[in-house]
Image (spheres, helix red, strand yellow):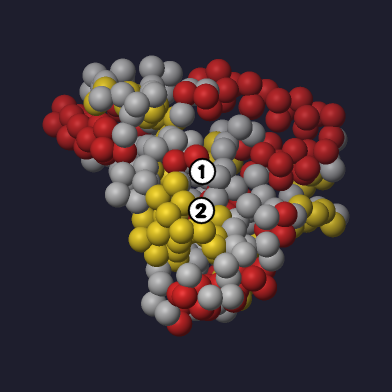
Amino acid sequence: MGLFSGFEHIIREQEPLAPYTWLRMGGAAEYFAEPTSVDELVALVKHSAENDVSVRVLGSGSSLLVREAGVSGLVVHLAAAAFSQISTDGTKVVAGGGAKLGHVISTAVREGLAGLEPLAGVPGTVGGALRDNADANGTDIGQWTTKATMLTRTGAIVEQEGDKLRFSYRASSLDELVILSAELTLENADPEALTKRMQKFWIVRQSSQPAANENPACVFKDVGGMSAGSLVEQAGCKGAAVGKATVSERDGRYVVANPGATSDDVLQLIENIQSTVQEKLGVELETQLQIW
């Protein structure tokens, strides 16, 4: 492994990526790394930049589709404990970019800190939630974020805070290679009342969307205040299928990967839905799914 000499302990070649995604499909990564510390990650990113190796970052894989051909370059998986630490100080929560969003929400609720509980049940990591400004029930994570620490594609650590932080619908200014950590400033509240509120949001979400064991992915963004799920249903696409990939009967924003489904099935299904919605309703559906 001459290209990554010195990193043999964390690098694997031709690592299948399907097990790391909710859709459970797609090809392999040319190189795959699971660094154990921020210093190791920085060294790996700098080495990749110096050798013109493209780098992609893999979080929970809840909104990722990997093509059957796989991914060239390096895929970095932030699974180590060093990237998922969560701490609280007064009304502030500091969370690593690799921390599960659900763990951050439950920590805040337990400490009597309100603001994030409407996001209960939203999958993914803090890094992914911040990059795409995850939202639910009238709340988005960006409105509570006061600082973010990131790693650039050349291996430099930078921060954004205050007016430099910008969030909009399913988008943010946090576009560097890795979101290492974020500071969220919340509001004091009664932990017991917050727990009940969080549980209510979680139950409603779970009852209205496909279960994780169905291998789902939320594909489409809402459009101008119109629910993407409603648009898909109005266009008659709910339940539509290509191969073993189907549109969820519960929520038209989701595609479900049944056993035997391929990335090509999903891509063709997405294209079919977009063209049908455009033709019947005159609305252009945008995807929120990452496609590698």
In this view of the protein, can residue 263 be seen by the observer?
Answer: yes
Q: Position of residue 291 (x, y in %)?
A: 35, 48
In screen coordinates, is 27 left or right of 277? right
- Distance from the alpha carbon under mark 2 to that under mark 1: 8 Å
In the rendered structure, the answer to whether residue 225 lies left or right of residue 99 reads: left
**Label 1 crowd bin: few (<14), some (14–19), many (20+), radius 10 Å:** some
Where residue 103 sits, quadrant-wise, is: top right
Residue at screen point 20% across, 32% down:
272
- Of 64 and 234, which appears nearest the observer? 64
Q: Residue at x 50, y 73 (%)?
A: 4
Residue lying furthest front: 1
Depth check: give the residue in front, 109 or 223. 109
In the rendered view, does 193 fall on the left or right side of 160? right
Q: Which residue is mark 2?
A: 58
Which of the labelled discs sits on residue 143, or is there none? none
- Find out whether the residues at labels 2 and 1 contact each other: C-beta distance under 8 Å: yes
User: Is the residue 90 above or below the residue 23 in the image?
Assistant: below
Q: Which image quadrant for residue 203? A: top right
In the rendered view, would you say 152 is above or below 91? below
Question: Mark 2 packing: few (<14 Cα in 10 Å), some, or many (20+)?
Answer: many
Amino acid type of the residue that numbered disc 1 sits on in the rendered structure? Tyr
Report if residue 226 is visible in the image.
no
Q: Residue at x 68, y 55 (%)?
A: 80
Residue 128: x, y in percent?
A: 53, 51
Disc 1: which residue: 20
Quarter of image, res 147: bottom right
